[in-house]
Image: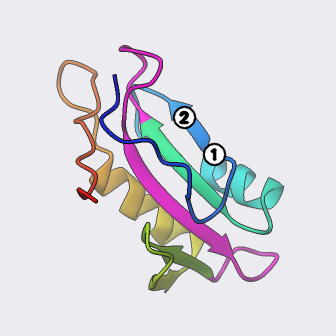
Amino acid sequence: MPKKKFEDIPFPPLVSMDTDTPVSVDQVSNILRERQKGASICIRSTEGHTNRGGYFFHVLPTDSDLSKCELYNFEKTLVATLPVEQITLFIRTYATVTSNGAAAPHRAPNN
């Protein structure tokens, strides 16, 4: 069971991606094109409890070609402005799939 519920995410509703492979630029681009007012994305491994955690990314596209996307933390503070390719690289770097195919667990801040 999750230790914390994320009810006040920056860009609800949460988009969950269950995958055992790194996300692609196309996958992230499709989400952001569908969610022009922002997307809170949770990357999780394909196995585990339904309410398991994952890696969370909060992204707001600021232009139609996704050349500028704002990355936010849980406190809704702007962290960086990057093109979708760099956002995807950032996601891939932190939501790394381990050798056994499972994503390492997300450690949310304690409140």
Residue at mark 1: 27
> Can residue 23 be seen in this snapshot?
no
Q: Is residue 104 left or right of residue 20?
A: left
Residue at image location 45% in from the left, 40% down from the top: 43
Q: Is residue 5 above or below residue 31?
A: above
- Whether 106 is among the magenta residues is no
Residue at mark 2: 17
- Foreground residue among 23 and 62: 62
Q: Position of residue 80 (x, y in %)?
A: 44, 84
Indicate the quadrant containing the N terminus: top left, top right, bottom left or bottom right: top left
Q: Is residue 24 left or right of residue 46?
A: right
Q: Residues within 10 Å of mark 1 (few under 14, many from 20)?
A: few
The amino acid at mark 2 is: Met
Q: Position of residue 86 (x, y in %)?
A: 46, 71
Q: Which residues are magenta?
A: 44-68
- Foreground residue among 78 and 91: 78
| Secondary structure beneath label 2 | strand
Q: Residues within 10 Å of mark 2 (few under 14, many from 20)?
A: some
- Foreground residue among 51 and 15: 51
The amino acid at mark 1 is: Gln
